[in-house]
Amino acid sequence: MNAQPKLKPYVIGLDLGGTNSVFGIVDSRGEIKATTAIKTQGFDKVEDYVEASVTALQPIIEQVGGIDNIKAMGVGAPNGNYYKGTIEFAPNLAWGHNGIVPLADLFSEKLGIPVALTNDANAAALGEMIYGVARGMKNFIVLTLGTGVGSGIVVNGQLVYGHDGFAGELGHVIMRRENGRSCGCGRHGCLEAYCSATGVARSAREFLLNSDEPSLLREMNPYDITSLDVSIAASKGDKLALRVYEFTGKMLGEACADFAAFSSPEAFIFFGGLTKAGDLIMEPIKKSYNECVMKIFKDKAQFLISGLDGSSAAVLGASAIGWEI
Amino acid sequence: MNAQPKLKPYVIGLDLGGTNSVFGIVDSRGEIKATTAIKTQGFDKVEDYVEASVTALQPIIEQVGGIDNIKAMGVGAPNGNYYKGTIEFAPNLAWGHNGIVPLADLFSEKLGIPVALTNDANAAALGEMIYGVARGMKNFIVLTLGTGVGSGIVVNGQLVYGHDGFAGELGHVIMRRENGRSCGCGRHGCLEAYCSATGVARSAREFLLNSDEPSLLREMNPYDITSLDVSIAASKGDKLALRVYEFTGKMLGEACADFAAFSSPEAFIFFGGLTKAGDLIMEPIKKSYNECVMKIFKDKAQFLISGLDGSSAAVLGASAIGWEI
């Protein structure tokens, strides 16, 4: 008679962001038992990144009793392909492999456990559905407003991966078809070029350049302005900074009105650095949405800010993929 | 011992269009056994429309052996709500009930069989999935190019209804945010205002007005020009008419590039009068899509014309809903 296979009580979640890679070891109730992090940038080859990750993981894996206690690993990554376990043509990650990086396989070989991978925003959406404000919802859209604009779309209670695993790139719908801002994806006029944290800083610089309006932001070197600076100025009543948030929120509302025509979600859930501005960004979004949307969708959707702290939503979401392997 | 319940071998499908209402009695293999039709317009109250429909249906119901042989009825209708069986705020149907018309219940009471209802374009998508070019596909989008522009979106093998039953209104994403054409929905710049059959005729009139370019279309009263006239002129090499198709196809390609960012479908399937122009419309769509779409989606999606004849796709699709009750 064989011994019963040992239960493995943990999964590893990895939130692979443009700047930081955050790892968490998570139990079946969604409690993060241990975390670690490395910088995402500074590696020429993905193999070096995986090596550095595994080195950083070793102590926290030991902390929970070793790799035998870990069932699997889930990764949320930019341009992550759920079906193939690859990161494909991620604008900020030059990691060789002709742009198609087999990250899940590489981690799986090094760690000796199964590894699955999805878009970082899809991971955030899973996190919201299992642990966050989308509990019980079957149709919702998560928009991540960080360095870029990402999205995770849930329809009929399932993540939308599309036929190739790349669905849910709502940061790259075109909002300005003429004279649109250049975008990291190589095209022009994308939502991300305006409504990411970097887009907000860019708007502030444009507004400063195109008027003589007094503003607290004029005290700074324009190139140093971040979305956080704009938020601080706006919270002090700075009119130019307030106009930047109105402009950003208006465009997000217009975009959400188009998204409603697609999947008519019960809620739009906003996640990431830009949501720290609270009503400064949320009120213009709601106002613009209700002004723009088709009559049949008016005043139906909720506009929510993620209820999960900091990067934990993404780590928890990534870990949730691990349980499903 | 009870007698075994009698098998009911047929369903009724109703394609409720802006102009005509086409009924078909369909067997389980998708064969249309009998059809009839009435004009959709000319009724002040929905009750009168249902009355006229049932009168028209009577002879073909008798033809298949009476109502006892009919399991259910499925309806494809503009602004049809699958969850509630209602038509809500359909721009071209002033049928009382404060704009929320309980069509499924009214038919069900009159006929004594269950009735389900969905968006006409969703019905077309079901038709394509069960009987048409989308057989075997799990992720695709049907765009209906008729009097308006409708859409049926399939994700993971399921129709996207959204939280309220109104998802899939891709004719009403905004393609021109400044100086957009007025649309039947009360807003401006919608895809439908440019890329429906009426939109194509409108483009031709605009192109004629804004230039002195010679064109076969100048022989007509501008107000009489239809998309069919534009198609005939284009097929004779008329340059202005060809430009109208290039303009229309370019915009459809741009729109599809945004839709790819949403659900990354395996195919875009075009249905309705405008597709009769064949390559005149399809080639500019494909060219524009591949120029506009994000790198990760390039050259992946198929662009297909519906393989189902005339209105049978919509009738078959509507009937398919009947089988699922």
Image (cartoon, coloured by chain):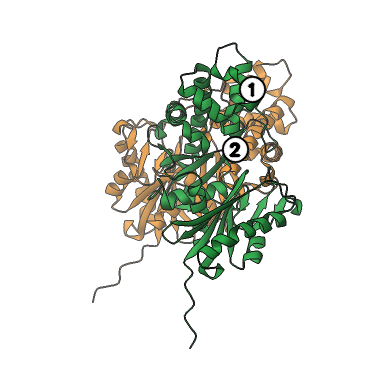
Chain colours: A green, B orange
Image location of residue A15, percent across then percent down? 56, 50
Q: Amino acid at mark 1?
A: Pro
Left or right, residue A262 beside residue A136: right
**Three-letter residue code for mark 2:** Thr
Question: Please, is residue B226 above or below residue B273 in the view?
Answer: above
Disc 1 residue crowd, few under 14, some 14–19, many 20+, Cα 10 Å: some
Q: Secondary structure at mark 2?
A: loop
- For the residue carrying disc 2, how many other residues have a C-alpha within 10 Å: few (<14), some (14-19), or many (20+)? some
Under circle 1, the secondary element is helix
Front residue of B275/A231: it is: A231
Outermost residue, left side? B1
Residue at 48% from the left image edge and 43% from the top image edge = A141
Judging from the image, mark 1 belongs to the subunit labelled A
> Which residue corresponds to the image point at 30% horizontal and 50% vertical from the top-left?
B111
Residue nearest the observer in this picture, A122 or B174? A122
Residue B269 visible in the displayed image: yes
